[in-house]
Amino acid sequence: MTRAPQYSSLPLLDLRRLEDADERAGFLADLRSAARDVGFFYLAGHGVEAEQNAEILSIARRFFALPEKAKQAVEMIHSPHFRGYARAGAEITRGRADWREQFDINSEREAVWRPGAPAWMRLQGPNQWPAALPELRPALLAWQSALTKVAVRLLHAFAQSLEQSPDVFEPTYRDAPNQHIKIIRYPGRDASSTDQGVGPHKDSGFLTFVLQDRQDGLEVEAADGQWIKAEPRQDTFVVNIGELLELASNGYLRATVHRVVAPPPGAERLSAAFFLGAGHDSTTPLLALPPALAGEARGPSSDPANPLFRHAGENYLKGRLRSHPDVAQRHYGGLIEVS
């Protein structure tokens, strides 16, 4: 089996190469290599206007500057769909509190769960929106729409890089894709706080896009166990693959562990993340890779603390329950065993 090269920084890919007949094959090869060898890369040429990205970071900053009472009015504990505000220390990763405050939204849809239905169906429902910042809703929903288009283009490219039909994943997201956004603020740590902005973890969907401000902190675990810093880079997103692509490719592509180190005292870090996942009621296909690629597939990772499920709703719910035990206890305690 070919040994993965070592990286000291994340590779840079330009999505404009995908539309260039002379560059297309090289881009697909570079995309497959980056996703297989390190699992993360910078994406340039994505087509999202710099002004729109700047607006997202600006409005995120205004949201986190709201009075505590205004943010608490939309706390996630009120939502069985895991939408809304979480204060610093409320989210848990690998048993430890993350030192960040955040606001989560997803696809704006009606609640569908009824008593007797599977617990994962409760993930779908309306978002919470702060009355004190009405401009947040149109800004985030517009960014969600723009990032969905980029993510679908990239997902088509991933399929082609694996010698599949470009729309091979489309049945899993066509009717109701999982479109999750987090705006996140990492306060500077003090002597009494942890350096865990977010603990080491993998993402549960297909693809993740991260927009960063000027403060670093995002780190990616390399094959040798060292950590690669994902330094902020202008006009790019940091992109990584999630567990669904690992499952679909039988481990040829592997979701990579990553973390965020809390900023030093006196500083703060702001970011916005978009996650594209399959519809909650879908099942991830196992792709029939060509022999040359199938021979390099390593099988999905086996971690007893993080089992992987092909059913998208189950795979997403297990992460939400573990990360937000207060929401799990209030809204899911009577549906499933919550530890």
Image: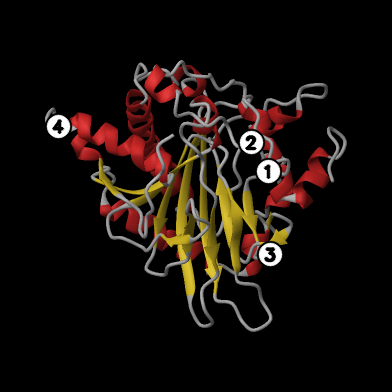
The residue tagged 2 is 316
Residue that appears at 28% across and 32% down? 28
Picture coordinates of residue 103, whole percent (x, y): 57, 54
Q: Nearer the viewer, residue 26 or 47?
A: 26
Residue that appears at 64% across and 62% down? 98
Q: CA distance from mark 4 to mark 2?
A: 36 Å
Residue that appears at 67% across and 42% down? 319
- Label 4 sits on a secondary structure element that is loop
Picture coordinates of residue 267, whole percent (x, y): 48, 78
Q: Nearer the viewer, residue 116 or 277?
A: 277
The residue tagged 4 is 20
Picture coordinates of residue 36, whole percent (x, y): 42, 39
Q: Are marks 2 and 1 in contact (CB under 8 Å)?
A: yes
The residue tagged 3 is 89
Dot 1 or dot 4: first in sequence order is: 4
- Label 2 sits on a secondary structure element that is helix
